[in-house]
Amino acid sequence: MNRHMTSHMPPHLAPHIPPSDASPEPPHAAPRAALGAAFAAVRAETERRAAPLSAEEQVIQSMPDASPVKWHRAHTTWFFEQFVLAEYAPGYVPFDPRFGFLFNSYYVAAGPRHERPKRGLITRPSVAEVGDYRAHVDAAMRRLIAEADAALFAALAPVVAIGLNHEQQHQELMLTDILHALAQNPLLPAYDPDWTMPGTRRASGMGEMRAMPEGLHRIGHAGAGFAYDNEGPAHRVLLPATRIAPALVTNADWMAFMEAGGYQDPLLWLSEGWAAVEAGGWEAPLYWRWQDGRGQDGRGQGGRGQDGGWHAFGLAGLKPVDPQAPVCHVSYYEADAFARFAGRALPTEQAFEVAAHQGLLDDAFGVVWQWTRSAYAAYPGYRAEPGALGEYNGKFMVNQMVLRGAALATPDGHARLTYRNFFHPHQRWQFTGLRLADETA
Amino acid sequence: MNRHMTSHMPPHLAPHIPPSDASPEPPHAAPRAALGAAFAAVRAETERRAAPLSAEEQVIQSMPDASPVKWHRAHTTWFFEQFVLAEYAPGYVPFDPRFGFLFNSYYVAAGPRHERPKRGLITRPSVAEVGDYRAHVDAAMRRLIAEADAALFAALAPVVAIGLNHEQQHQELMLTDILHALAQNPLLPAYDPDWTMPGTRRASGMGEMRAMPEGLHRIGHAGAGFAYDNEGPAHRVLLPATRIAPALVTNADWMAFMEAGGYQDPLLWLSEGWAAVEAGGWEAPLYWRWQDGRGQDGRGQGGRGQDGGWHAFGLAGLKPVDPQAPVCHVSYYEADAFARFAGRALPTEQAFEVAAHQGLLDDAFGVVWQWTRSAYAAYPGYRAEPGALGEYNGKFMVNQMVLRGAALATPDGHARLTYRNFFHPHQRWQFTGLRLADETA
Amino acid sequence: MNRHMTSHMPPHLAPHIPPSDASPEPPHAAPRAALGAAFAAVRAETERRAAPLSAEEQVIQSMPDASPVKWHRAHTTWFFEQFVLAEYAPGYVPFDPRFGFLFNSYYVAAGPRHERPKRGLITRPSVAEVGDYRAHVDAAMRRLIAEADAALFAALAPVVAIGLNHEQQHQELMLTDILHALAQNPLLPAYDPDWTMPGTRRASGMGEMRAMPEGLHRIGHAGAGFAYDNEGPAHRVLLPATRIAPALVTNADWMAFMEAGGYQDPLLWLSEGWAAVEAGGWEAPLYWRWQDGRGQDGRGQGGRGQDGGWHAFGLAGLKPVDPQAPVCHVSYYEADAFARFAGRALPTEQAFEVAAHQGLLDDAFGVVWQWTRSAYAAYPGYRAEPGALGEYNGKFMVNQMVLRGAALATPDGHARLTYRNFFHPHQRWQFTGLRLADETA
Amino acid sequence: MNRHMTSHMPPHLAPHIPPSDASPEPPHAAPRAALGAAFAAVRAETERRAAPLSAEEQVIQSMPDASPVKWHRAHTTWFFEQFVLAEYAPGYVPFDPRFGFLFNSYYVAAGPRHERPKRGLITRPSVAEVGDYRAHVDAAMRRLIAEADAALFAALAPVVAIGLNHEQQHQELMLTDILHALAQNPLLPAYDPDWTMPGTRRASGMGEMRAMPEGLHRIGHAGAGFAYDNEGPAHRVLLPATRIAPALVTNADWMAFMEAGGYQDPLLWLSEGWAAVEAGGWEAPLYWRWQDGRGQDGRGQGGRGQDGGWHAFGLAGLKPVDPQAPVCHVSYYEADAFARFAGRALPTEQAFEVAAHQGLLDDAFGVVWQWTRSAYAAYPGYRAEPGALGEYNGKFMVNQMVLRGAALATPDGHARLTYRNFFHPHQRWQFTGLRLADETA
């Protein structure tokens, strides 16, 4: 999801909030306790992810697409202050009335594009003050969840649910954004030396393909349970006969592509993809670098010695590339070129959803997001909701591609069969990989 | 179609060339005569379109997306020289061996991006020399078509068919490109004072909608007859229940949108669309300008007087906007915003094709290209052909939107039910309009 | 002089116009005849320079710094229409009232920066119509010069003198601009195959140096005779003891610099000069290219073969570099780096003027403009004149460097000891070379 | 001085280092004690300036021209480690061998332009670690200064002097850079609420002018005492008769210029200055903003109310503009336009130096740097020194203008009559103002 979306999350969430039970609250009060527990857990997870980072590391912003960790922590807090406490908590006093301007990109009509790249210059409020802000809002939220009468609780619970899902998205962005920032430091500091990217179940994504015959399938979210509005309406689609790989493409597969000259052959690339290769000097996934036996970066030194190897910078720092692990930090352009190289294609998002539902896929969730060949677009009959939370629906439905699945950095409970992630085809700083498919029609 | 594609047309054409009859040629030789006549007609149409333009007007290039008229005339000629005469005409001597470099963007591996914007600087060969070049190639082509033996004719006929379709695409671009160039001249010279944009059959595109129930339909090209490879494979799709407007959106409709503040309300726009509005200062379709009663441009003069009116620059020069005519020269972003303003959507390309096939649409062809909400992508099972003419298939299938129908400037015989035109969502210099639709699911 | 200046020439000219004789006109009327002859000669020279160029070649503009030949022809004509005929010729009817907008950058308050790069898109008026425009104005001017009474003649004569000097500047720009345009054409067409760059009197600019002791000198224009206002006020300067080379730096000298790695050693360059080298990929003067024995451009092909050589594109087309000729088309940055390489410096403009006055220099005029190390600035006591013709005085006195002398393309009669030409330090498309100097203090 | 220079300071300093006494050290050891005391004082001043800033504030970089405070602290430390300790302290072990890469822009041949804008992303070493680095180097330096034998001391003392002057320049940049960074924060935090810009001695810079007759004067540094090499060689100049204002231009003067439409009248501006006004939307000095009675920023809200006023953001935060204070944070372009508006000019740097030497000027030092109309260029006979410390001499002598005097932020002991500061004409973030002059020739 691109940055614009993530900071405008509320409107996306509106239509499919499961209505809380508006009947008189039973004595056991399970939903209330559950919501309180969910609130505590999600808020704590944000802090857990920020904890390894110093104040300096929380303030920096390494590119306009990314935001500082401190901003993520404050923006998600502002969400509850603005959409829950200001609406439903009588007499709530904002922690600091100026924070709305700083941490809400939503109402900043005047020049939001100019402001966003300056998030990394907001030294005050400090990291400590943002911690105080979070504590202040958490206390008010705890009190509100515990003490709201049944009618009030019924009204606010769906908004809290939105806020928690919103914060979970930012939890993943906190990691991708800080990883990008740390990668700019020549010292290559680790976020967490013990972080590991899981290996895949299979050594290669280029082997077995599993077949799905042509057929009608129901796609998209329906029923109870939280979902973003872009996951609906549920609708029927005609899936053409398709084969899909159960396995993710691995680093070993990718190195074969590189060794075969994949990054040097314009015939494998979309026209705009090749332009990105040339403009960016791409020759490997983002964060990869060749390192020789003496720990020296070998780029531009007239060829690579025999005793070196590819390394990848990740949350654990710079490590040799693990051939068994899924390839990660590749753009759609690269994924598409790889598929062409392999004589295959990427799956459509519909094929992915059907296959995942039928259990044909390994590693569908929890490893890397998987590029599909579907442009991000409205489902048939999708219509933006009226009102503030719905006003921007569909705003990002152009020039982006859908990713399916979920990644290692995706918080527990945030993955979903119908989930539609989306980024621009040139973007590489998310945990993005691929699996192969083709249609046999 | 964007410029890159148009100058790389050959590969796109390969798969669906109807094979000419390879059996021994019958005495009446109809296909041979027909091909010769088609060749003569298409080549003459190019010259007819260039005829009103002086040498100065044929050399200029007003933006990188456009090409000079002289370049179009030479490039389409080079196509026949390179792919037909050099292949099939023994002993053919190129008119000038240096022209391949100048008029072929295909093999210019070194820096084609730098070269393209410099097409407007090629003063030599002169317009007169390009005329000689065309005559030289035409003569050789006529001879070859007339004299080739049956086997040779069978081999070259499909390539000539490609070349003629290729040239027809450039015929439309000649008009859109010269219109853009003339629009840069403060004197606003007319290409042809008698050119008219046809009125639409209806006064508004916001009235009647026609319904199509959910159902399976076959989409795409199959069978004999020429088609580009991106029109296939033909395949079945499940069309959701859809309503579609028989009428094109008109200038009257568009002025209502403008008067309602459509260009000032970010809530109506895709996020990237709004960025285009702001960056480009868009406040009306391309080529529109407000003119007061004294013929003065009213922009930036503190508001528009009561006695003025909107004018549009077109091939006939600057004329008052005709409310009955279809709106033209709007981008996808504008079309999408208008649809949101109207409480509707754009049709998918599948809905357009089914509705056009069923005869539900007025003005489907021959007025303006119509933006659909379908991103330009491969049909299921589409696969690039091997070999030179197929090497770039699919190269443009990202970040562009499909347009359907055909425009007033489209040459006779070039429109087709399954035709898929495509441009980037910000582009406005083609003859692009829209009709409304929605899904009722 | 940069383009801004040249199109705003009038104001620069005001202060030093030699006053015409306002006394009653003597019977022989010599000044009147002389002015008429000068007018005819200058106007004819412009046409002589344009004559070899087709309509296509007269319309194109290859970069924002340059203007089309047709524009130069029309702009210089507009000058006389606007500043002479409209002021002094009662009842004069402009040839076309719209031409003021097209050919006058002076009053176009609204966005002149946007307009200038579009000069190459003005296809109408055509080259033929511009010829008519020149004839129309010439006829009116001839009549006015011949028939004005003495008082009127006294008033208009200085303005005509300005207009003629203004046109002479454009005559030089016509050649530098068309040379740049032709250089963009891969066919490298010649402006005039017989054009030659003169050899220098000496084989090297790195030999003899001539000494000037410290001393007071008078600098700048004074007295009768035409001069631009930036050449005054005449004033005394203290010249430090200086040595200056009588000879221009030659191509042979420059090739020694190149072979010594001059373009690869950042220590020889100004910081911004090195940035220009890197950004522009400079490795030789503008228009030079390495050509091997088979006429192939050797750049980027992994080294240069033994049998090739440096060629320079000029008004006569592409020719082998003549070691005896002065180096030409080098920027200030290159001239400065060369001087550092040579262990010397460039002369100040004061040292040049004194040395030229004392006759110490060979080839001071008529070969190439010579970069000095003087930034273009006002002389002491320089003050802009009031009124229209003086309003922009001094407008370009920042970020440009003074060149002295005159070039082969400078029209006869336009060179002057006190003449101050100026361009930005990165510009290379003028006929610019250098000579060495140093101060011995 | 621009950033490039400041980070390449050593070479500039070489020629004029006063040689320390190489004779056997006398018992009282005065120079040694003095150098030790100077070292302690300068190093402490850096820390004093950094002390009010949090870790977050020390890491950020608000534009490529600026550097983070932490970087300034580390870079000045690296200077002593690299040029003193590594050279003269046997057995010295660098604090961290990787710091050379991070804090030395000097030897980073590969892509220094890419690196510099990323200084704000160096979160590690942390502020605390940089503090440790400073302490480590300070201890080694103290020891070396105290214990070096006489010969060693004689060799290292001049390099230490360079390092101290270098650090003093960075002390000023620390304040200008952090001011720019804090200005990007909508909360407008103060660096030090008690900081004040001194008033000027006079209420206006537009009154009295003091005359200097034409005459020969000696300019530039000579003799003992530290100076940068660009301050020499001392040489004679002929100063034209000049009048110079004893007073600095004040905010009251500047508001008169603004009220007279100074920022709206292109006739007052250099051509490139006007382009800067338009591109940057300049309408007041940098950091000024109009604030109405309710503390709202009035820009873009359709005019400014009567009850508001101009405020300036400074090291003390946002304060009403003090009419008595000198105008500050104006570019050369603005200074030049103001002078034209006032019917005057800026002084040459020679006139400034002579007038300051003769005592004609109030507030020459310690308030604001004062733009001169002299382009930054080599003095006659200036020649770069051979060797590492001299290799880049003169590297910045193009496209920049000389400022004279010194500002409030200039450290004690760093101002000098012959000091030549220089910046590009568009730059405004330094403490830059002006005084008027003119030549009467």
Image (cartoon, coloured by chain):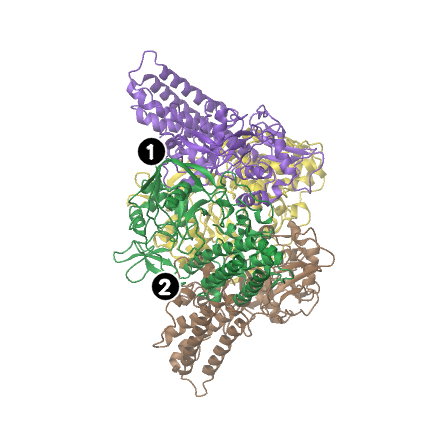
Chain colours: A yellow, B brown, C green, D purple
**Amino acid at the residue labelled 2:** Asp
Q: Pointer 1 and pointer 2: residues touching (CB < 8 Å)?
A: no
Question: Between A39 and D145, which is closer to the camera in this rendering?
Answer: D145
Q: Give the quadrant of residue C288.
A: bottom left
Q: Which residue is mark 2?
A: C194
Q: Position of residue B386 (x, y in %)?
A: 40, 65
Q: Position of residue D203 (x, y in %)?
A: 62, 27
Residue D117 vertical position relative to residue B284 in the rendered view, above or below: above
**Amino acid at the residue labelled 1:** Glu
**How many C-alpha atoms fall within 10 Å of the one at disc 2: few (<14), some, or many (≥20)?**
few
Question: Between A416 and C352, which is closer to the camera in this rendering?
Answer: C352
Residue D293 visible (yes or no): yes
Q: Chain of mark 2?
A: C
Distance from the alpha carbon under mark 1 to that under mark 2? 48 Å
Q: Where is the C terminus of chain C found, in terms of image quarters?
A: top left
Outermost residue toward the left? Answer: C306
Residue D158 vertical position relative to residue B271 in the rendered view, above or below: above
At mark 2, the secondary structure is: loop
